Amino acid sequence: MAEDGIARARRLLEPPSRKSAALPALGAAALAATAAVMMAGVMVLGPGVRFDGSATAQPLSPNG
């Protein structure tokens, strides 16, 4: 009976083994990359940049 209790206590003291999962790490890396690209865009364009409508293309003829 004492041997069983000691073996059980030793099992409880062992840290649980964790399997490394690649999917959560990949998700965290994708989130960090997206945030970095968005922050870089804000820094390059600045806070006051606005895009009003679409730009019209100029005709290619030299006579206008």
Image (spheres, helix red, strand yellow):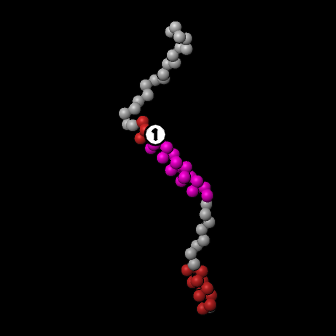
At 48% across and 23% down in the image, what residue appears? 54
Location of residue 24 in the rendering, given as x and y in whole percent from the top left corner: 57, 56
Identify which amino acid the numbered label 1 is placed on: Gly
The quarter of the picture where residue 8 lies is bottom right
Q: Is residue 27 above or below residue 64?
A: below
Q: Is residue 39 magenta?
A: yes
Location of residue 15 in the rendering, given as x and y in whole percent from the top left corner: 56, 75
Quadrant of the image containing the N terminus: bottom right
The quarter of the picture where residue 20 lies is bottom right
Q: Going by the image, does 39 lie left or right of 14?
A: left
Q: Quick one: SS at disc 1?
A: helix
Q: Going by the image, does 5 lie left or right of 55?
A: right
Q: Is residue 52 above or below residue 26?
A: above
Q: Residue furthest top?
A: 63
Numbered range of the magenta stretch: 22-40
Location of residue 59 in the rendering, given as x and y in whole percent from the top left corner: 53, 14
Q: Residue furthest left?
A: 48
Name the residue tied to disc 1: 41
Tell me the chief SS of the magenta region: helix
- In front of the other: 13 or 42: 42
At 44% across and 44% down in the image, what residue appears? 39
- In front of the other: 30 or 8: 30
- In front of the other: 34 or 16: 34
Q: Residue furthest front?
A: 62
At 46% across and 23% down in the image, what residue appears? 53
Q: Is residue 26 magenta?
A: yes
